[in-house]
Amino acid sequence: MMSFGYSADLLARYPQVVGGVILAHGLRNGPTPEKLRDAYLNEQQAVIQRIGKTPLSQLPSLAAWRTAFRGFGVEPTQYRSAAEALLRRLTKKGDIPCINTMVDIGNLVSIRYGLPVAVFDIQSITGKVTVHFADGSERYVLLGADEVEHPEVDEVVFSDEQGLVIARRWCWRQSEPSAAQESTTSAIITIEAHHAEGRADIEQALAELQELLRTYAAGDETRLTATILDASHPRITDEANEE
């Protein structure tokens, strides 16, 4: 079973949040194919041109995420949202390196919309994943590390039913166990927004994510279940068995 949703307490503080979610089974990950690599590199250059000299803090989608971070006590220039971190690297370094098919699909859509996209391998996840305020007992392993950390009390995290954190500071950084590897076949994929035009952007981005997954990461048994979550529809659950 895959299940992803928002807690009632979090929605009470952030009633405007909109999340696009894909529950994916039977995917094929691996090295980024040449056609996708070209599309990703072209998108990077288009984004650089579109942003120009506009400060990232003035992009509505990123400004809204900065406000959301401050709402749970995090300084957004110290801990940047995943989308802002990607765009910051892109505008300063001139490119973002390819990692693998699923990650590059997520990053392509992320920079296009200025919104955080996460691809979570479900292999280490137990039960439902919920976005909620941490109580501090949850366990987190930083991407690329092996030391167990604990989130701050009232920090927004994604965690499963066993207290395993798969993302800290909402969309700052995901965990080592949840990172999409070339062996990943089942995943929870999310894209989230807080800004005024967020729902329209999420609708378009969610459709594009599904199209890219079907084009570059689909196999004969691929199943994608997608929806948009908000305060009136806070959770998606897929009872399909992982193969």
Image: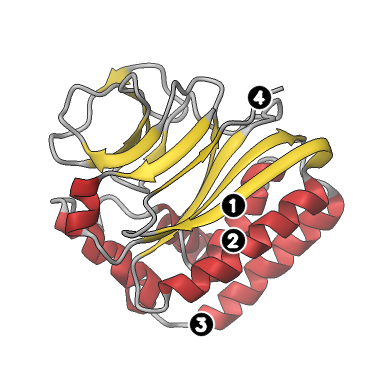
The circle drawn on residue 242 is: 4
In the foreground, 157 or 104:
157
Q: Earlier in the sequence, mark 1 or mark 2?
A: 2
Location of mark 2 (residue): 206
Residue 237 position (above or below residue 141): below
Q: Nearer the viewer, mark 2 or mark 3?
A: 2
Marks 3 and 2: in contact by CB < 8 Å?
no
Whole-Å distance between the Cαs marked 1 and 3?
A: 33 Å
Three-letter amino acid code at disc 1? Ala
Three-letter amino acid code at disc 3? Gly
Q: Earlier in the sequence, mark 4 or mark 1?
A: 1
Whole-Å distance between the Cαs marked 4 and 3?
A: 44 Å
Whole-Å distance between the Cαs marked 4 and 1?
A: 16 Å
Task: Locate the N terminus and report the quarter of the image it occupies.
Answer: top right
Disc tally is: 4
In the foreground, 84 or 96:
84
SS label for mark 3? loop
Q: Could you tell whether 69 is left or right of 198 in the image?
A: left
